[in-house]
Image (cartoon, rainbow, N blue to C red):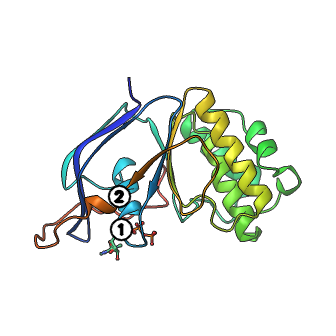
Amino acid sequence: MSLISVSDLAVSRGGVPVLEGMSFAVAPGEVLVLRGPNGAGKTTLLRTLAGLQKPYAGTVEAAPEAVAYAAHADGLKATLTVTENLAFWSGVYGGAPIAPALAHFNLGSLRDRPAGNLSAGQKRRLGLARLMVTNRPVWVLDEPTVSLDAASVALFAAAVRAHVGAGGAAIIATHIHLGFEETVFDVTPYKARQDVVRDDFDRSFDEAFL
Ligand SMILES: Nc1ncnc2c1ncn2[C@@H]1O[C@H](COP(=O)(O)OP(=O)(O)OP(=O)(O)O)[C@@H](O)[C@H]1O
């Protein structure tokens, strides 16, 4: 029984097909790592898995509200403090406690700092801590380690390990090796023919409540 599966999926960006013919499923406990060169379509695929845009063809199957998405834009409220940001997201997602997320990502000493005044890596840590208060089983992560130092990459890897160890799953686009026991899905062979142009439903809300 998978947490999310795609069948004959095709995705487009700006009306142009990017990837096509993809089928895969991700089970509880599994980490799927997306690989492929810059511009191959990993972000477009992740946005489609998160429901931010419609597939061009094929299907994505997951339980309603199964996916928590973390993109380049961290989805943080700049004027709210670290604690307030996590409390906000916890409220949106159903009230998970924020203390474990604060502790895990070593944010305790920054708890009263407005998110807008954090460094890039600290913002990224807060964006990832947000995942821990979502209670959602499938973490869909776009280049999650950008701006993170080695210690923070290790914190992130431990959070993912704990999440999948508790029956969750993660789909991660990354160019670095995180040391997971992982399934690799290279998108390169699925490059779409680009001779068809059709409209898609690109709502472009990376910072939306997902
Ligand atoms: N808003 C947009 N409108 C039109 N085309 C776009 C848009 N955003 C991205 N693209 C194009 O869509 C293709 C897929 O981009 P995407 O961001 O999904 O690739 P990626 O594999 O995530 O790349 P990277 O590794 O550089 O992050 C690229 O050719 C890109 O130039």
Asked whether, in this view, residue 67 is left or right of residue 5, the answer is right
Disc number for residue 170: none
Q: Does the residue labelled 2 lie within 8 Å of ligand 1?
A: yes
Residue 40 image position (x, y, % from top left): 36, 68
Residue drawn 37% across the image and 33% down it:
64
Residue 94 image position (x, y, % from top left): 57, 32
Q: Does the residue labelled 1 lie within 8 Å of ligand 1?
A: yes
69, above or below 2, in the image:
below
Residue drawn 77% across the image and 60% down it:
150
* SS state under label 1: loop
Residue, disc 1: 40
51, above or below 138, in the image:
below
Q: In which quarter of the image is the N terminus?
A: top left
Asked whether, in this view, residue 199 is left or right of residue 202, the answer is left
In the rendered picture of this protein, how many numbered marks are placed on residues?
2
> Are the residues flagged by discs 2 and 1 in contact, CB closer than 8 Å?
yes
Question: Please, what is the three-letter code of the amino acid marked with disc 1?
Answer: Ala
**Which circle's residue, 2 or 1, is located before the other in the chain?**
1
- Give the image quarter of residue 66: top left
81, above or below 119, in the image:
above
Which residue occupies the extreme top position in the image? 1
Ligand 1 is located in which of the four quadrants?
Answer: bottom left
Residue 109 image position (x, y, % from top left): 89, 54
Residue 88 image position (x, y, % from top left): 63, 46
Give whichever of 181, 32 is nearer the camera: 181
Disc number for residue 187: 2
